[in-house]
Amino acid sequence: MRQKTQIQDDLVRVARPSAWLMTIIIASLLCAALFLLPRLNLIPFDADHWTADWRTALLSPRAEGQDGNVALVLINDETLDGYPYVSPIDRGLIAKLIDTIDRAGAKAIGLDIVFDRPSEPAKDGKLVSALKNAQATVVLGVVNDNLLSDKQKAFQAEFIANAGRSVGHVHFLLKGRKLAIDEDTIREIPPPLSGRQSFSWALAKADGEPETPASNLIAWQRTPKDGTDMFLSLPAQVLLAFAGNPSSPLALRMAGQLKDKIVLIGGDFASRDRHPTPLSIVEESRQPGVAIHAQIIAQLIEGRTLWELGPRIEIAILFGLALLGCYLGWRYQIKRLDLLVGLLGTAVLVAVDFLAYANYGLILPFATHWQAWVLGVTGGHFVAMLFPPPERSGTVGGGLAT
């Protein structure tokens, strides 16, 4: 009996350090793989995006009521009924909208419309005059030069020079990763591009220079609690219908709703400039680009932000999860507790993830953390095959079996 006990003690002394070394090696490899491979375009980020989108759609905050800083004037198919063409949008129509909104006392006017080709010369001139004469701050939406032909580039540059107004690019940030299933989903605030600030940022400056958010992620807001639309949205044809009689009660009411607001003019067409967002999971619809710009502008004005983990913290968490999972997978496999370990760890990760977002606006890469945990537990099973853990008698935590 004494000889048998000595042999067991010797095995424990040899196996335990070897098992720990193997556990550390496996955790390090898992950490490196999960952190580096997506960034090298060798595995996709889509799982983290999918879980983050669900979290955003379900837990994003709701304002008490409609946003008081931004309003939308939307040009739709009905607006263009009776016009001989729909593209480019009639420049005379846009000029009338600018005049009407400016008379209403808007703080700023943003045109989420690209001017990259001529239309009818008289109407082009009328639009330039409206832009020059507007008392409000005006920001023109522009397209990056590398997306335009030489003729389009030349016209856009000439139009901007003639209008004499600020510009901002209307591009949304898409990562363009090779292994991405949903890369067209809009999640981030557009950064400066080719020396131009984004359309949203240029308009937010009308309310004062905004603070730079902690991350580029859009801090979405869901439908307000009172059931109104997130932003006042007026169809262009309704606004213009009462512009000819500015003293009518309805015209005065609409003018009052636009006063001192940042007003965006943009398209609301079923077949163009519509994008999926995280909110599309619940709302089951794509948002027009102008509505996404409105969300970003409101966020910048209010100073709302979301947070992401820095690389060092992320690496430390991945290593810790993989190491703990690997150890528990090795230590408790013989007690048939590995499934319980995996499920409890998953439940804890879900709870931490939801609480971090709901209380602190912290975006955690849940799918990557879950993979580190589950693969760590699986790695622990592999370690147990090479270095079996010490047998225990009675309950977990008892002495070595004799």
Image (cartoon, rainbow, N blue to C red):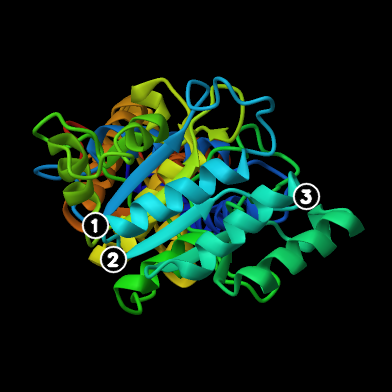
Local packing at callout 1 (Cα closer than 10 Å; few below 14, some 14-19, many 20+) is many
The residue that disc 1 covers is 69
Q: Are the residues at dot 1 and dot 3 in contact (C-beta closer than 8 Å)?
A: no
The residue that disc 2 covers is 301
Q: Position of residue 227 (x, y in %)?
A: 14, 29
Q: Is residue 364 visible?
A: no
Q: Residue at image x 52%, y 50%? A: 95
The residue that disc 3 covers is 117
Task: Answer above or below: position of 332 versus 161.
Answer: above
Q: Position of residue 378 (x, y in %)?
A: 50, 35
Q: Amino acid at mark 1?
A: Asn
Secondary-structure class at tag 1: loop
Q: Residue at image x 74%, y 45%? A: 119
Task: Answer above or below: position of 228 versus 78.
Answer: below
Q: Are the residues at dot 2 and dot 3 in contact (C-beta closer than 8 Å)?
A: no
Going by the image, does 355 lie left or right of 340?
A: left
Task: Answer above or below: position of 54 versus 141.
Answer: above
Q: Are the residues at dot 1 and dot 2 in contact (C-beta closer than 8 Å)?
A: yes
